Amino acid sequence: MVIDTAELFTPAPGRLVLRGRVVTPLEVIDDGVVVVDGQLLTWVGRADRAPEGAELPDLAAAGSPSTILPGLVDVHCHGGGGASFPDALDTATARVAIDEHLRHGTTSLVASLVTADAETLLARTALLAGLADEGELAGIHLEGPFLSRTRCGAQNPSLMVAGDAQLVRDVAEAARGHLVTMTIAPEVAGVGGADGALVALTQVGAIPSIGHTDGSAEEVEQALDSAFERLAEAGTRSGRPTATHLFNGMRPLHHRDPGPIAACLSAAARGRAVVELIADGVHLAPATAKAVFDLVGPGSVALVTDAMAAAGMADGRYDLGPVQVRVTDGVARLVDGDSIAGGTAHLLDVVRWTVGCGVPLVDAVQAASTTPAAVLGRTDIGALEVGRRADLVLVDDALLPLRVLRAGRWVAPRG
């Protein structure tokens, strides 16, 4: 399937006035208005304070109003719609995955690769950089190859290698400024130290992300502190390191051996890290997801999908880089083994599940938009605020998608 980007959008009028329940970073406005002029949001607020001259839709005539969310921002996604970023050999294939998530409300997407040999990583990075140049991707994330074989998850442990600062620089060059994050395990040789991969990441403007690690709490705490200090010096897109899908692919938390989870939560609670959560009903229990929000707050949580090619697709077999995945009842697991192999949800599904865990809608939306936008260093997306890009999602009372607007243009429905 080849996606023509021009066919994804339908024209919107020069000025667009939307009315409904509006979710801002701070509150839910039950009767709110969002005004779009061109590609920008020019007014957001209560309907009874709308700017003079704005022709407001009749809320009563429309029946049950839509809820208006900001366009969602996913900083960890391997694919969707049957297409996989780690396996894409051309931009048309990658666009299939981008389109799948865009039509479900993700207006800014980071493409994630998995552990592979250096030649493959460089080739895939260069391919995706072209789409980032065009603004179709918000950046690139590498999940490996400097990871713990003990905590390899659904990735191929035979391809995991020691930290290599030169490979970091080579990948960053191929990414042409679009390398956002790279997942690393602090205990792996060559990751730490003045000449290690962690420091190299901060030097090329990318964010170290702690994950797939069997490290101790002390090792991870030291790595997070080092990354935080180095990012401040480098002036990169974000001043905070991240944790790749907290809990998953990590040594479990134990009261006498707290491991990486305790260190990541502590750093996030102090505003020195952002933790990713795959809150999709498969990777975490509801109480776990809610506890993290209660402990660190939505400003330090980035909801992610970790989606692979099966997102939006039927059960069956799919590729995830060098490994084969079987999806049964919407759950992806390795064909050779039983490890969970990424997600099959869209980010709006993750928001809906998170709200179902008891997390307030405002907090769940912030963690799927404003906080990940901050990870990208972007202040032009990720919130319904004046001056930001006109990205928004209209959803029904069940938080199911109705329409999507990106940069002031409606995304055409499928079919």
Image (cartoon, rainbow, N blue to C red):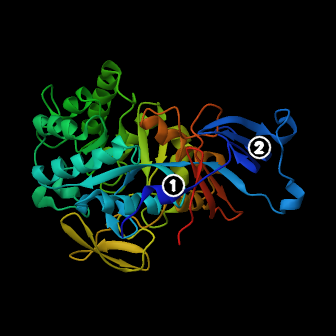
Label ID, residue 289: 1
Report the front residue among 345 and 79: 79
Label 2 neighbourhood size at 10 Å, few (<14), some (14-19), many (20+)?
many
Q: Give the side of residue 257 with respect to residue 304, left or right.
A: left
Report the front residue among 308 and 211: 308
Q: Position of residue 16 (x, y in %)?
A: 71, 45
Residue at figure coordinates x 58%, y 34% from the top left: 388
User: Mark 1: which amino acid?
Assistant: Ala
Outermost residue toward the top in this view: 233
Q: CA distance from mark 1 to mark 2?
A: 31 Å
User: Mark 2: which amino acid?
Assistant: Val
Is residue 279 at all visible to an observer of this figure? no
Q: Position of residue 128 (x, y in %)?
A: 28, 49
Label 1 neighbourhood size at 10 Å, few (<14), some (14-19), many (20+)?
many
Q: Position of residue 113 (x, y in %)?
A: 26, 53
Q: Give the side of residue 394 with respect to residue 221, left or right.
A: right
Residue at figure coordinates x 25%, y 40% from the top left: 175
Above-or-below relation of 71 to 35 = below
Q: Quadrant of residue 91?
A: bottom left
Q: Position of residue 200 (x, y in %)?
A: 19, 30
Foreground mark, 1 or 2, reads: 2
Above-or-below relation of 52 to 130 = above
Is residue 129 at all visible to an observer of this figure? yes
Report the front residue among 409 and 356: 409
Label ID, residue 156: none
Describe the element under mark 2 as helix, strand or loop. strand
Report the front residue among 134 and 375: 134
Circle 2 sits on which residue?
33
Residue at figure coordinates x 25%, y 43% from the top left: 216
